[in-house]
Image (cartoon, rainbow, N blue to C red):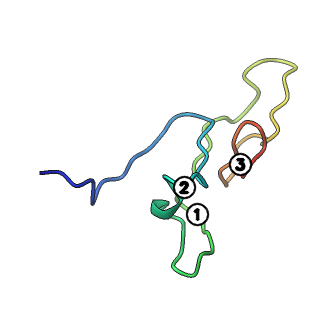
Amino acid sequence: MFLGKGFTVASADTGVEWTHEALRKNYRGLKEDGSVDHNYNWWDGVKKPVVAGKSNVCGYNVSYPCDDDGRI
């Protein structure tokens, strides 16, 4: 039987809402006191614009989670 414990799940999507109720409580960067540490828990693979002339509200090569609409 698998209970889902001891597994790490990753996503290659730029639109992950880590604060979503289904994810936040299990987010690896969430500390016991409720503060958040994104070090080693977030990686942005988008280093430069993908579409010329199109802006990205999050910026590029950021070190924190940011959804495409600018939420963090």
* Extreme-bottom residue of the structure: 33
Residue type for callout 2: Glu
Residue type for callout 3: Val
- Indicate the secondary structure of the residue bearing disc 1: loop
Task: From the image, tell me which residue sits under label 2.
Answer: 21
Distance, label 1 to label 3, CA atoms, is 11 Å
Front label number (1 vs 2): 2
Q: Residues within 10 Å of mark 2 (few under 14, many from 20)?
A: few
Q: Which residue is at the front of the view, 23 or 50?
A: 23
Question: Mark 2 or mark 1, which is nearer the start of the sequence?
Answer: 2
Front label number (3 vs 2): 2
Task: From the image, tell me which residue sits under label 3.
Answer: 62
Taking 65 as reference, is 32 above or below it?
Answer: below
Residue 68, percent across and down? 72, 36
Taking 10 as reference, is 37 above or below it?
Answer: below
- Indicate the secondary structure of the residue bearing disc 2: loop
Residue 12, percent across and down? 51, 35
Count the marks: 3
